[in-house]
Image (cartoon, rainbow, N blue to C red):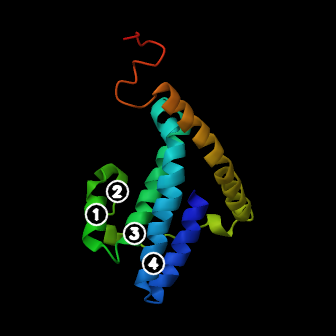
Amino acid sequence: MLTKLDAVTRDIVVAYREFRLHDAYLALQKFDSDDLSAFYVDALKDRLYTSAPGSARRRSAQSAVLEIFRTIAVLTAPILSFTAEEAWQALPAGLRGDDESIFDLAFRRSARSTSPDWNSGIRSRRYVRKLRPPKANAISARCRRYRIGRPNSMRSAHSRRPA
């Protein structure tokens, strides 16, 4: 996800430098809805909810989420300055470091995007996204069938008594 974030960051910074604010906004919104909400956050939930608090998997996920938050806050600041500042102030002081305001941060410079493995990371992500819908659909169908994740889901179809 961080490689995709790097690519989106580059596009948004170019749009800002060329005063194409609408394009920057659209790229940010597309990344948020298509990549973060529809894919990454959904895939990350299990790791965050089920891993032990100090486990490497959970800490890695938390570090990635913090980096994504920081980057999106900085990218949002030129067009939604008060909202970006409010989000930054909501972050615990220990995670903000020496940066008291969102405007103390600069646009992110990426070392990852120049590495030789950058394109392979993007290709791997595309492959995983192609596999995800059939699996997600199968899981959703099973959840509906067994009433998992719904109110009163403790009462499964198997435990109901005939009326």
Q: Nearer the viewer, residue 68 or 46?
A: 46
Residue mark closest to the camera, 4 vs 3:
4
Residue 124 tag number: none
Label 2 secondary element: helix
Badge number at residue 24: 4
Q: Assign the N terminus to one quadrant of the image.
A: bottom right
Question: Which residue is labeled 2 in the image?
Answer: 96
User: Can you identify the residue that label 1 sits on?
Assistant: 100
- The span from disc 2 to disc 3 (Cα, nearest Å) is 12 Å
Residue at 68% x, 57% y is 126
Viewer-side residue, 101 vs 123: 123
**Residue type, numbered disc 3:** Val
On the picture, is 135 further left or further right than 34? right
Instruction: Give the mark, 1 or 4, whose residue is nearer the N terminus.
Output: 4
Locate the C terminus by quadrant.
Answer: top left
The residues bearing labels 4 and 2 have C-alpha atoms spaced at a distance of 25 Å
Q: Neighbour class for label 1 at 10 Å: few (<14), some, many (≥20)?
A: few
